[in-house]
Image (spheres, rainbow, N blue to C red):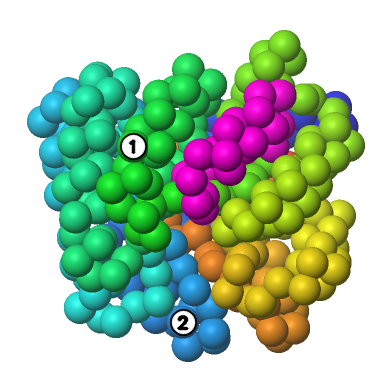
Amino acid sequence: MSFISKLIAASIPIIPKGVVGFFARPYIAGEKLEDGIRVVKDLNARGIMATMDVLGESVNSREETLVMRRQCEAVLHAIHEHKLDSNLSIKPTQMGLSIDEAFCEENLRVLLDIAKGYGNFVRIDMEDHPYTDATLAIYKRLRRDYPGHVGVVLQAYLRRTETDLRDLVADAPTNIRLCKGIYVEPEAIAFKKRNEVQDSFKQLNEYGLGNGVYIGIATHDDVLLEHGLALVKRLGLKREAYEFQMLLGVRPQRRDQIVAQGHRLRVYVPFGDQWYPYSTRRLKENPSMALHIVKAIFGIGK
């Protein structure tokens, strides 16, 4: 990232919330469950799968956690009621991981009981490194009791991820979303250079798909997309053995190209009233969009 891009990304917190909301609209479905349902129906009509996410991360009390869990329960019921081709993504801290690991697992089991009853699936997101060990430990216990209904996320930029993947593969059938990783982590535990992260992603993808892991190849990076497309062809994988994943509002033309080539693709559909933290994170990852916001505020280029 260039100096100018870094400067633009750093300026996002001082941009008025309303302006951020306007430019972030392509990345979020809306504030209500009905908004998420509408967007997923549109994606499904285009032959695209979805994963729905109620926006919100770490909660501060058990009461807040239960409110969040009930919202996630409502998503699973709505997916079934509306016959949507979608599953649910959740963050462990939404379910109380920062409060108590056992409490978090208890809440996840409630959601997985519903998902299993509907023949659906819950994806456990990976957050920053203090939660990695606990998240993987919970996932291992849950996949034993809910095979085929739960998966986890691995982040290619963490130096530990190769070991984590090998451990998961050796233990039981595994379903992962493989992404680069977005949290700011120390260099001691995370690759920082773009080519290092790309190399790690490629190696993980090759090892996982080559050893029967179902992988959601979650990237918008052309280098990694082309590698993934070539890899599934080289391995002769059936289309049901993997999928590509992208964020709502990011590179829709590339997304449609992949679908047109006959590959399964799932779009991450976030919604909820806690859209602002998610939106600012997306804009920080996309300085070119942030540049448009800065220009709009100051009337540059008019």
Q: Is residue 267 above or below residue 154?
A: below
Residues at marks 2 and 1, CA–CA distance in whole angstroms: 32 Å
Residue at 25 percent of width and 34 percent of height: 105
Dot 1 crowding, Cα within 10 Å, few <14, some 14–19, many 20+: few
Q: Which residue type carries mark 2? A: Asn
Name the amino acid type tagged 1: Arg
Q: Nearer the viewer, residue 219 or 14?
A: 219
Which part of the image, by quadrant, shows the N terminus? top right
Up-down: is 206 above or below 2?
below
The dot on residue 88 is none
* Number of the front mark, 2 or 1: 1
Q: Please identify the quarter of the rendering in which residue 99 is found.
A: top left
Q: Is residue 279 magenta?
A: no
Kindly tell me whether residue 98 is visible in this rendering.
yes
**Residue found farthest to the left:** 63
Q: Pick whichever of labels 2 and 1 is earlier in the sequence.
A: 2
Image quadrant where one finds the C terminus? bottom right
Which span of residues is magenta-colored? 152-175
Question: Percent x, y for residue 286?
Answer: 70, 45
In the image, residue 174 lies in the stretch drawn in magenta: yes
- Name the residue carrying label 1: 141
Q: Is residue 286 above or below residue 212?
A: above
The answer to whether 127 is drawn above or below residue 45 in the figure is: above
SS class, disc 1 = helix
Residue beneath the point at 27% across and 23% down: 101
Residue that label 2 marks? 44
